[in-house]
Amino acid sequence: MSTESASASVFNINALFDNPLFAGGIGLASLGAVAAFARKGAIATLGAARRRLLVNVEISKQDPAYPWVLAWLSQPRENLGFITSRLTRIHNLSVITTTASRTGANGPAHAHFFLQPGYGRHIVKFGSTYIAVNREKHNTANMNTGEPHEIVQLTTLWAHRHVFEDVFSEAHRLAAKANEGKTVVYSARGMDWVPLGDPRKKRPLASVILDEGVKEAVVDDVKDFMERQQWYVDRGIPYRRGYLLFGPPGSGKTSFIQALAGELDFSVAMINLSEMGMTDDKLAYLLTKLPKRSLLLLEDADAAFINRRQRESDGYNGAMVTFSGLLNALDGVAAGEERIAFLTTNHIDRLDPALIRPGRVDLMLRIGEATRFQAARMWDRFYGDVDEDHSGRERFLARLDKLGLFGEGPDGKPSHRYTSTAAIQGLFLFNKNEMSGAIDMAEGLIPKKFEAGEAVPEGAIKTPA
Ligand SMILES: Nc1ncnc2c1ncn2[C@@H]1O[C@H](COP(=O)(O)OP(=O)(O)OP(=O)(O)O)[C@@H](O)[C@H]1O
Ligand SMILES: [Mg+2]
């Protein structure tokens, strides 16, 4: 009997519902389910509404506009009013520090801290429009640099979507203003061009002293080329021009290209061909995506040629650019359409004639040892204000003549001895305040290799057999 009643009570559902505890539980659970449903529905409706009512713009860290937008976000905003100023307070900040040596003081370096909105959500007001900002770091990374991917997302009302145009042009204007009077130098990092350090102050073209007429010839050629884009397009010729500057170290090749970039308001995109890890593929790829308005600078062009010889002898190419790799990058099918390239080398004899062909190199120039003309101009730049009657300059030039530093001895015979403009600059820098010091120490301009072999008595000229 007792077993029967037990089984009956187990299967009797009604009895369960009669239990106030159980019925209450069910009631609560169904209420919960309804609430969860409603919540889901609300989220979906809200999501749909969001999608319809709002616009997002996503800017990834790879995009050039990324730093511009961050800088724009960091701009102080004025006259915001009580509520807006509280609403748009940025609570998460990140810092970018740049150091610079203080001008005129030899104390510790001067540090400049630049605060930017950090990761997370912020609200900014632009004109009369509120924009929600979300800066996020992703947990994926750039395969080349190992840097995590980052985005900034700007959100505003659909009705205000046109504000983004203004935001971007304002951000770009700010960035352009910050770089005004500066030259940005890009170098290759992995497969990307990244600015190498902070933008440098433009180097005035007048500060680079080349032999008579050389500078003007190149500048005119480049300017002429820049005005002729349509001419090239009309004739179906790729709009490219290449220059090769060759000559001994310290003659001002790199400085000239940097100054030229400043003059044209271009940036410099620099690749050192002798750099480890620079391969043909990488070079070709980088040349297809040069930063806009930049001069391509390929330093040490001879490296690619040495490499070819190595490959012939041992078949191994130490992960460097090869000769054919360089030629292809310069004018192969994949070569970029618009480009001004400068190649430099200290060893013209190592180059191959195949390089010097229109389309690859259109103009070749030797930037050589210091000439009389250059020495005189450099003197004027350094001591022009104190040497008003030019007597110091004449003494200096006479001394260099006596030392045979312009390739000719006082007796008119070739001296085979030259100095570099870099050495002259060094001498002047050493004697900043005292021009007579520069004259006295002019002997230091004699290239070291002459001193090492045989002791050259002062004033004596070495005439090879
Ligand atoms: N013609 C020049 N006019 C003004 N400054 C010069 C000149 N030549 C060299 N200098 C100075 O000498 C230094 C070295 O010059 P730069 O790096 O331009 O030489 P380079 O020709 O590129 O040498 P390398 O072949 O070794 O790369 C710079 O500080 C530069 O200011
Ligand atoms: Mg150089």
Image (cartoon, helix red, strand yellow):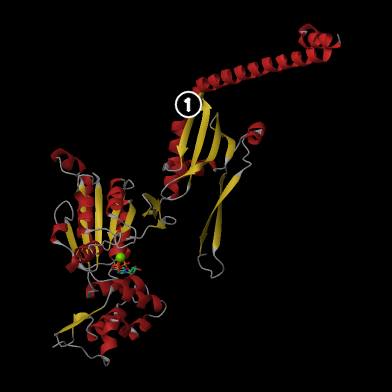
Q: Which residue lies furthest to the right in this view?
A: 2
Q: Which residue lies furthest to the front in this view?
A: 1
Q: Mark 1 points at which residue?
A: 161
Q: Relative to residue 210, is residue 92 drawn left or right? A: right
Counting from the top left corner in percent of width and height, residue 66 is at 46, 42
Q: Is residue 383 or residue 252 the one in the foreground?
A: 252
| Crowd rating for badge 1 (residues with CA inside 10 Å; few <14, some 14–19, many 20+) | some
Say what secondary structure mark 1 lies in.
Answer: loop
Q: Relative to residue 296, is residue 32 drawn left or right? A: right
Residue 224 makes an appearance in the image:
no
Q: Is residue 309 or residue 419 the one in the foreground?
A: 309
Q: Quick check: 274 above or below 170?
A: below
Counting from the top left corner in percent of width and height, residue 407 is at 19, 80
Counting from the top left corner in percent of width and height, residue 225 is at 20, 49
Q: In which quarter of the image is residue 336?
A: top left
The N terminus - image quarter:
top right
Residue drawn at x 40%, y 54% as measured from the top left: 182
Q: Is residue 38 or residue 331 the one in the foreground?
A: 38
Ligand 1, image quadrant it occupies? bottom left
Amino acid residing under circle 1: Arg
Q: Quick check: 465 above or below 374?
A: below
Counting from the top left corner in percent of width and height, residue 253 is at 27, 64
The C terminus - image quarter:
bottom left
Q: In which quarter of the image is residue 276?
A: bottom left
Q: Is residue 319 or residue 174 the one in the foreground?
A: 319
